Every structure is written in structure tokens, then in C-alpha cells.
Amino acid sequence: MDVVMLSRIQFGLAAGVHFIFPSLTLGLTLLVFLFEYKFYKTNDELFKTISSFFIKILGLVFALGVATGIVLEFSFGTNWAEYSRMVGDIFGAPLAAEGIFAFFLESVFLGVLLFARNKVSKKVYLLSAFLVFFGSHLSGLWIIIANSWMQTPAGFAIEGGRAVLTNFWAAALNPSTLVRFIHVIIAGWISGSLFAAGVAAWYLVKQQHTQMAQKILKTAIIVFCIMSLVQFASGHLHAVQVTNLQPEKMATFEALWQTQTGAPMSIIGIPIESEKKTYFEIKIPKLLSLLAYFDPNAQVKGRDAFPEDELPPVLLPYFSYHVMIGLGSLFALLSIIALLLLLRKKLFEAKWFLYVLMFAIPLPILANEFGWIAAEVGRQPWAVYKVLKTVDAVSTVVPATHVLLSLIIFSLIYLLLVVLFITILIKIIKNGPQAQTY
């Protein structure tokens, strides 16, 4: 295996493990703020206990997010030196801003939440909860700006073989930043709310901490229901953006081999790239044209409209994209069922649905991972779209054996970290919300 493929696998592994934690952080900071606000308004000690419980989990998730994220920052220098040399002046700016403006804000006030419950006023504590919420989302914005610039670069010029920033706002607010930020934030809220709902469901099934579990479940399920349905609109807007700005990526997502008017939407199938054919395909006529251009007879570019050496592979992006949409549809179905049970006041007694919520906890994480794989593999062969190919971005002085060795070591470390995370998380949940308050 060559150094480019090994470096891609190593970065994909690091990013894939890291991506578990920021999405959970986004959702948990929202719930902590909501529960802390309820405690502030009602002075109900149950909300204080619930908030402290999720702050403890948030601390664990945050720590793992930091530990796994540091590797990504260093890998740009170790494995992707040519990338850093050419576009580092632009790409490094949002990463630095994330550290200075967001990470420290989030870290400092998370410290207040973890250790200063009895040392500051309720108002200051609530403000701290908001600033942790705000800081985590600001952090997400800077990271999305950096990644979106790789997808739809803007506000730069090539001088002396390097990308030079010419317009900060054009680069930061490049054509895909806003829609991708909204899509990722909603995905994070879905992840956090379904996690909390699943934990509460487990308590209700076990008939433990029932009063608190009902309060957790009611709040979490309302957030989950709203966000699961809103995500459809967000996902649609993102798909339209991809169709317009990265048409070969959408053609790959849909395994659309030829350009055609009235293009169908592929529901499922087995695309074979070498034959340029999709076997056992189920598709809905004209739906892709309708959704992309609001015209059932509009022309959609297929893979035949682009040079072969500028096309991504088909199989992985196709299945990742469709699994993500399938899971999103499942979340919408769960939301409708949950709303019906909530309106009929049977949510807390419907044991079958409580079990569904428990087993659904990892599904939003999987949806996020598949969405990320679709976005990143679908951008290939470009590291920066139409500017720098991945094969030209890798470090030229690092041999494949070194990358392979570090890949094996990182894999073992990540496995250890994930096992530790799950072990500690289960212990916190089993101890329950009343195990300790701050």
C-alpha cells in the first residue's frame, strides 16, 4: 500500500474517532443549558441534579474529544506537509481561531460547571452553561469554515505556488459554510438528545430514578423530534448546494452514470463502477431533478460529464450517502411515534418504545460518520476542490513504513480510549443522576 493511501486511512481513522465526541458535545451542551435554565426559573432541585449528571458526562465526552482531536492538528504537519505548505496560510487561520476564541472559552466555563456549582451564584452558573454551549458551537463553526473551504474554496489567489488569502469573509463564508454548519449542528443536537432519551428510557425500564428520567425523556424527546424533522429541510438544502457546486459528487452519490433530463433518485442498488451500471436498483423517476432544481424535467449532470481523473470512487460514497439518509428517515419515523405517544400521555409507559430508544443511542453517531465519509470521499481526488489533489498534498519525505507503524499505534491507542470511554460512561449512568451533585 502506498504512502498516500496509508496517510488517508490514518487521517480517516483519526477524524472518524474524533468526530464521535464533538457531535455529542453539541447536543449535551444544549441539554445542560436547558436543564440549568429550568433549575434557574423553577428552583426545582431535580433539574439541578439532572444538569449535574449531564455535566459529568459532558466532561468525559469533552476530554475524549480533546485527546483525539490533537492528533488531527499534528497530522497536517507530519503526513500532509505539501498540503500545509500550499494552503496552510488559509487553512491554519480558522484552526487557530478555534483554539483562541472558542476552545478556551468552552474549557474555562466547563471548569466552572464541573467544579464551582457551590462557589458561584445561580445566575453566574447559568451564564457559564450558556457560554459552554456558545463556545462549543463557535468551535464547530471554525472547524466547519476550515473544512468547507476545502469543499468550496473562495477568497484566495495562488501566488508562488501557495494559496494566499485575499478576502477573509469570502473565505470564511464560502458558498458551503452556512448550510454545512446548520446541517452539522442539527446532527449534533439529534445525537445528544437521542443519547439522553435513551439513558432516560433505560432508567424507566429499570424503574430507577423515574421522576428524573421522565423529565429528561420529555425534554430530550421534544428536542429530538423537532430536530429530526428540521434536518430533512437542512439536508435538502445541503444536497442542492452540492448539486450546484460539486455536481460530480452528487452524480456519484446517486450513481448517475449519464447526464439526463428528468433524472431519477436512486433509493438503493449496487453500483459497479467498472461497468458504469447499478444492479438491483430501485429508483423514483424524475425525483432527483425535482429536488435539485424544483423542475422534474431539469437536466442533472452525470459522471460522464467530467474527466475520469477528476471523479471520486462510487461504491463508498454511494452507500454512505444512502445509509445516512436511511437513518435520517428512521429518526423522523421515531419522532412521529414519540410525538403521538407524548400527546396520548403514554410515552413513559410504552416499554417497547423505551427499548427502541435505548438501542437507537448509537444510530445518530453512525449517521454522522456515514455523512462525513460521503462528504470527504465524495470530494476526491481533491484535497482542496479544483485546487490541490490529495496525491499532491501528502508529505514526500515520510516513507510508507513509518506511516503504517504510526497507523498501527494510533489504532491501538484509539481502541483503548474508546473502551475507556464506554466503560466510564456506563459506570456514570449506572450510578445514576443522584450519585453526586456539584
Image (cartoon, rainbow, N blue to C red):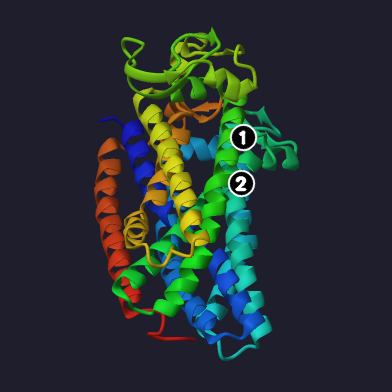
* Rendered location of residue 426, percent (x, y): 30, 70
Residue 390 in the image: state x and y as whole percent. 45, 29
Is 373 located above or below residue 214 in the figure? Answer: above
The quarter holding residue 38 reads bottom right
Rendered-image quadrant of the N terminus: top left
Number of residues whose C-alpha sits closer than 10 Å to that of mark 2, classed few (under 14), some (14–19) or many (20 or more) = some
Residue 182, numbered label: 2
Q: Residues within 10 Å of mark 1 (few under 14, many from 20)?
A: some
Residue 160 appears left or right of 252: right
* Residue type, label 2: Ile
Dot 1 corresponds to which residue? 237
Secondary element at tag 2: helix
- Left or right: 38 as drawn, with respect to 355: right
34 relative position to 50: left or right? right
Residue furthest bottom in the image: 118
Q: Are marks 2 and 1 in contact (CB under 8 Å)?
A: yes
* First reached walking from the N terminus: tag 2 or tag 1: 2
- Three-letter residue code for mark 1: Leu
Looking at the image, which is closer to me, 75 or 311?
Answer: 311
Residue 30, position in %: x, y? Answer: 57, 64
